[in-house]
Image: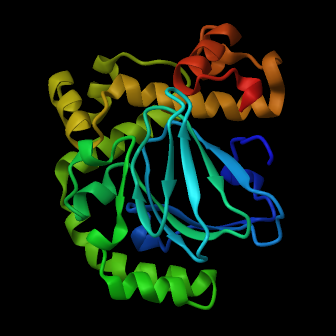
């Protein structure tokens, strides 16, 4: 079995298809993706970084996958369609031989809101998809003939959720704040962020905890690390890491150990 590695969207390996949502769903969905490991003769592992996003995953074969936490090394077997919560720490996902899976990656906080799931219920955890989505939709997606048909079915369902999500004031402020964080090149104070999104520090912290179960500072750290790892994979230790919010390379390495229990070269 290959050692698990992080796979970023822009790499587009041959076993991965990615498609971005229709314009009207861009506030709900990050993207759709499908893994097809049917030509592989050994189990396949991918490292999932700490993330603010939640996923829904539809296995398209009868194979299984397992999750192994990088922190406590506990392993859990996952069978059937699942809701996969946001992560405060990394894990390795291992797919059995022949696996094929369709997934939807949602924008931070969105899935919890329209499915009415408590934030603590999903953080570093998962839930049965059949408890929250119509069984007829799950069956139709699994039986669909291809990736594009699965996306079309999902978008018909999600189009009925747009109005409720767009009317959610707290979620919109959290999403706006995350966009500000993602665009910044240095660690801003909470006070500076609050000025840009026009809310108080106490209000912003409360909204983040309610919507994501994490503080604004924790979220910025997760976003900064993902950006740092992308630069590391492209440029190694020679990149000027203070340009993306770190004091130096050793600061980035410290984040890697804290968030994934691994050094950057092990990811």
Whether 147 is drawn above or below 125: the answer is below
Q: Position of residue 71 (x, y in %)?
A: 51, 26
Q: How is the image coloured?
A: rainbow
Q: Nearer the viewer, residue 201 or 49?
A: 49
Expressed as whole percent of the image width and height from the top left, the position of residue 10 reads 72, 52
In percent of the image, x 25 and y 49: which residue is there?
171
Left or right of 31: which side holds 54?
left
Regarding residue 132, the answer to whether it shows in the image is no
Rendered residue at 71%/33% (across/down): 267
For the question of whether residue 183 can be seen, the reply is yes
| Residue 221 placement (x, y as % from top left) | 47, 25
Q: Nearer the viewer, residue 247 or 39?
A: 39
Q: Is residue 80 left or right of residue 110?
A: right
Front residue of 240/122: it is 122
Q: Is residue 200 above or below residue 33?
A: above
Residue 163 picture quarter: bottom left
Residue sitting at x 22%, y 28%: 205
In the rendered image of this protein, does residue 245 appear above or below residue 208? above
Name the one closer to the observer, 42 or 14: 42
Give the quarter of the image for residue 158.
bottom left
Quadrant of residue 147 in the image?
A: bottom right
| Residue at the spot 19% in from the left edge and 46% down from the top edge | 170
């Amino acid at each position: 079995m290959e050692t698990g590695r992080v796979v970023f969207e822009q790499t587009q390996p041959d076993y991965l298809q990615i498609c971005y949502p229709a314009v009207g769903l861009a506030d709900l969905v990050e993207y759709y993706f499908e893994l097809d490991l049917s030509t592989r003769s050994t189990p396949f592992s991918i490292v999932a970084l700490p993330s603010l996003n939640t996923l829904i995953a539809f296995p398209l074969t009868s194979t299984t996958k397992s999750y192994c936490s990088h922190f406590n090394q506990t392993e859990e077997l996952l069978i059937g369609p699942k809701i996969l919560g946001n992560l405060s720490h990394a894990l390795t996902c291992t797919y059995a031989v022949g696996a094929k899976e369709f997934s939807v990656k949602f924008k931070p906080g969105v899935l919890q809101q329209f499915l009415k799931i408590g934030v603590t219920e999903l953080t570093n955890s998962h839930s049965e998809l059949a408890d929250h989505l119509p069984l007829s939709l799950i069956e139709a997606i699994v039986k669909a003939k291809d990736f594009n048909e699965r996306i079309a079915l999902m978008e018909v369902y999600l189009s009925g959720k747009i109005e409720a999500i767009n009317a959610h004031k707290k979620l919109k402020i959290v999403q706006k704040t995350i966009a500000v964080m993602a665009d910044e090149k240095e660690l801003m104070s909470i006070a500076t962020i609050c000025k840009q999104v026009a809310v108080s520090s106490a209000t912003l912290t409360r909204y983040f905890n309610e919507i994501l179960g994490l503080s604004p500072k924790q979220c910025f750290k997760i976003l900064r690390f993902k950006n740092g790892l992308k630069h590391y994979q492209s440029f190694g230790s020679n990149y000027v890491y203070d340009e993306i919010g770190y004091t130096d390379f050793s600061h980035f390495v410290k984040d890697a150990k804290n968030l994934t229990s691994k050094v950057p070269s092990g990811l």
